[in-house]
Image (cartoon, rainbow, N blue to C red):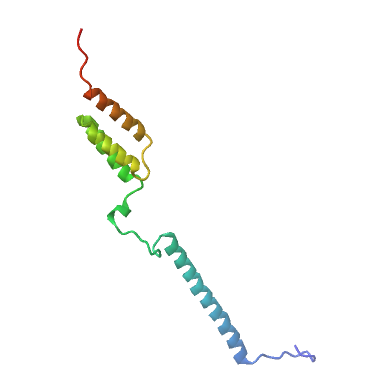
Amino acid sequence: MEGNGTFTAYPRGRRRSRAARIWLGILVGVVAGNAVAAGTYLAINGIASDKVDVSPRSAERPGAASAAHRLAGLEAMDRGDFDVAEDEFLAALRSPSPAADLPQLLKLTQELREQRGAPPLPAG
């Protein structure tokens, strides 16, 4: 507003320039936001990592190897093959995320193997 009470209109080019700057700022903000979101997604999901493991074992759930060795050890115990059972339980203990009962199973296997290997007690 000028001193005499009339409005002075801004030049038309300046309004377009301001609107263009606003839209350009919005566009840059959206692109930057999408770039940050994509980077976060890639970082969280391990896609951006240089050390992506594509082996078939990478798809296993944690503790799957330990569970497989534990099951093989139990089957060997059932067959009476205590040497194989002990080896399987030891392998299960060395695997990531071993089951909590593996030390007891290993001890039981060793005790059963010792009992089986001992000569039978004489009758009488």
Above or below for 114 versus 39: above
Q: Is residue 75 visible?
A: no
Above or below for 24 versus 10: above
- Pick the quarter of the image with the N terminus: bottom right
Left or right of 51? Residue 19 is: right
Q: Is residue 59 visible?
A: yes
Above or below for 75 versus 64: above
- Which of the 4 image quadrants contains residue 68? top left
> How many marks on residues?
0
Left or right of 110? Residue 10 is: right
- Pick the quarter of the image with the C terminus: top left
Q: Residue at x 61, y 87 (%)?
A: 15
Between 117 and 84, the one nearer to me in the picture: 117
Position in image of residue 107 (x %, y %):
33, 29
- Which of the 4 image quadrants contains residue 91? top left
Which residue sits furthest right? Answer: 3
Above or below for 110 versus 87: above
Which residue sits furthest top? Answer: 124
Q: Residue at x 42, y 64 (%)?
A: 42
Q: Residue at x 33, y 59 (%)?
A: 53
Between 45 and 74, the one nearer to me in the picture: 74
Between 30 and 110, the one nearer to me in the picture: 110
Position in image of residue 64 (x %, y %):
32, 45
Q: Residue at x 47, y 64 (%)?
A: 40
